[in-house]
Image (spheres, rainbow, N blue to C red):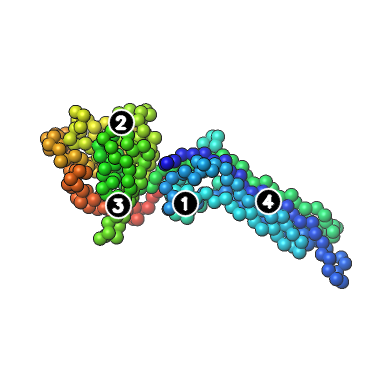
Amino acid sequence: MFIDETTIKARAGDGGKGCRSFRREKYEPWGGPNGGDGGKGGDVILRGDDDQNNLIDFKYKPHWNGERGEHGQGGDCTGREGRPAVLRVPLGTIAYKLPDGEFVGEVLEDGQEIVLLKGGKGGAGNTKFKSSTNRAPTKTGPGLPGEVGDFRLELKSIADIGLVGFPNAGKSSLTNLITKARPKTAPYPFTTLHPQIGVIEYAAEYERLVLADIPGLIAGASDGKGLGHRFLRHIERCKLLLIIVDMAGTDTRDPRDDYKQLLKELELYDPALLDKPRLVAANKMDEPAAVANLKKFKKRYSKVELVPISCLSEEGIPKLLKELLKRVKKMRAKEKKSPSRTA
């Protein structure tokens, strides 16, 4: 099961109580106060974990609590701080505070931490209340309560390539071919029910690219039709959009109209998606109708960069892989020169 959005209830740990204690040593009858402070309560922390790929852990465990700080002890010993509640989340996770949906932060790097809630401060021991006029104070601090809050966690996958297309265009078949991900493939719409994250390995170049395959889009996806609209956020951070088109025109479809409709749905969801570099994979070139359709497609979209492929015969796959690597490497080099984070 793939979970990319969920809510959690969290509570940071309370601070420990301060200690009331007095020195009782031989030959020191008036030793004075020596009560230690209480320990700080444990925070609630989001931590980026490259080994996580969705939020399923928080779907079935929505309650997270930091540990209470230990109470202070005699001998001026401060209580131990409470252990934090560390929520290991996949890279690309965004946290919003409920009920108003206030943006809290986003996790983009492995090991990056965001403190959602702070633990309560420990109470002061009676040593802190000692003064020239009060040599034997009995007062102590109770420790402050930890912060409490509800949060919505939303995942926007961080991938190099976003794979977009209509149902049955061959997205799952292509993902099976070029990555180790194994999405379901079948001759009916919406075989892909949730995003698939796969890794393209280039052994000779010691390189790897991350590909996000989202469920097929249909006309009206931006208005909530079909499944793909729910997952379009997973391509917002992609460096390159790979648009796969059924060039054979299955079910009397026109590849030119399909491409136009796909761009329209992307624009309706977020106009910024059209500013991303994109490459078209003209699939099903093993079928007779595909050759004539490709000529018509090139005539209408003469400036569109495309690579003819066939997921059945694997024609054009090596060329596509080479082109993807070349483009992503070029964009990575550009980002290093002028680093910026995509929201």
Q: Earlier in the sequence, mark 3 or mark 2?
A: 3
Q: Would you say residue 150 is visible in this rendering?
A: yes
Label 3 or label 4, whichever lies nearer to me, is 3
Q: Residues within 10 Å of mark 1 (few under 14, many from 20)?
A: many
Q: Residue at x 51, y 41 (%)?
A: 60
**326 or 90, which is in the foreground?**
90
The residue singled out by tag 4 in the image is 15
**3 or 220, which is in the foreground?**
3
Q: Position of residue 156 (x, y in %)?
A: 41, 43
Q: Assign a secondary structure to mark 1.
A: strand
Q: Residues within 10 Å of mark 2 (few under 14, many from 20)?
A: many
Q: Position of residue 229 (x, y in %)?
A: 36, 33
Q: Earlier in the sequence, mark 2 or mark 4?
A: 4
The residue singled out by tag 1 in the image is 48
Q: Residues within 10 Å of mark 3 (few under 14, many from 20)?
A: some
Q: Residues within 10 Å of mark 4 (few under 14, many from 20)?
A: many
The outermost residue toward the bottom is: 27
Q: Is residue 82 left or right of residue 205?
A: right
* Vertical relation: 300 (above or below) 142: above
The residue singled out by tag 3 in the image is 200
* Vertical relation: 235 (above or below) 322: above
The amino acid on which the numbered mark 4 sits, given as a three-letter code, is Gly
Q: Position of residue 63 (x, y in %)?
A: 57, 43
